[in-house]
Amino acid sequence: MTISLLTVLVVFLIIILSSAIRVLREYERGVIFRLGRLIGAKGPGLVLLIPIIDKMVKVSLRTIVLDVPPQDVITKDNVSIKVNAVIYFRVVDPERAIVEVEDYLYATSQLSQTTLRSVLGQSELDEILAEREKINQNLQRIIDSHTDPWGIKVSMVEIKHVDLPVEMQRAMARQAEAERDRRAKIINAEGEYQAAQRLAEAAQIIGQYPTAIQLRFLQTLSEVASEKNSTTIFPIPIELIRPFIEVGDKKK
């Protein structure tokens, strides 16, 4: 009987000690409540609790990566899109994270979803696609300001994917193709304009030096002959046959 009682006492003592001694990792903090009242946050390392009287809630201080599910958003220019994002945040004040909000993970997730729909709803589609960094910073600032009373610091918000309707994708493809055609025509016209300017300058130089046209003529013949063509056509300057034309006119 004595041995059985001693065994029960030993087991009870082990249970009491196991509930009174806690070991927290480097990235963990323990928020302790004594008879329902907040005592403070302790850790890391060995933490001693008063059995039955003290209750401890563990809080991780590591950065949490929260995936925001796709949200249906109507942009400022009335385009319906689906957008998802990812949020990086961490607990900086364990006491407020436990006392000020019931579930800080769920609260941060819901706040991120509503903020994402609100901010993107005030932006046009072109702005969402072209100025994503600016929108990310705006989202981070708004969410961080709302989670600060909960002891949470939002370090980064990134829009992962913007899902466009098929009709909008086709319209954007046509717009991009038209833009490329416009640039090609402008480049072609600019090239023609520069070529015309160079030809005009060359004509002025040749006009000042008549022998330059003969040199150019001989250079052209040399280039044609190098191609090994069976037939070579070359023009005859009018000055060479003008005397014969004048003699023929006199005979008439």
Image (cartoon, grey):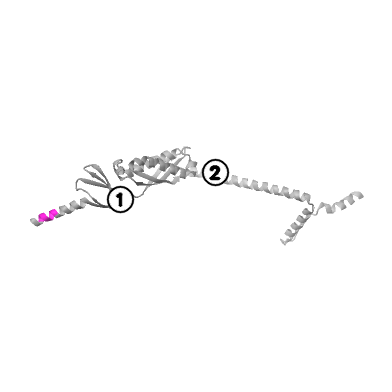
Q: Position of residue 79 (x, y in %)?
A: 47, 39
Is residue 53 toward the left or the right of residue 25 in the image?
left
Mark identifier at residue 175: 2
Q: Residue 138: x and y, percent? A: 43, 41
Q: Position of residue 204 (x, y in %)?
A: 75, 48
Q: Which residues are magenta?
A: 4-9
Q: Depth check: give the residue in front, 214 or 161.
A: 214
**Which quadrant, please, contains the N terminus?**
bottom left
- The mark lying in front, picked from 2 and 1, is 1
The reply to whether the magenta stretch includes residue 6 is: yes
Q: Secondary structure at mark 2?
A: helix
Chief SS of the magenta region: helix
* Residue 210 at x, y percent in the picture: 79, 52
Residue 211 in view in this figure: yes
Mark 2 is on which residue type? Gln
Residue at image location 75% in from the left, 57% down from the top: 219
Assess disc 1: are there few (<14), some (14-19) or many (≥20) residues with their C-alpha within 10 Å of its C-alpha: some
Q: Residue 28, which numbered label? A: 1
Residue at position x 67%, y 48% in the image: 194
Badge 2 density bin: few <14, some 14–19, many ≥20, Cα 10 Å: few
Quarter of the image where one finds residue 53:
top left
Residue, far left = 1
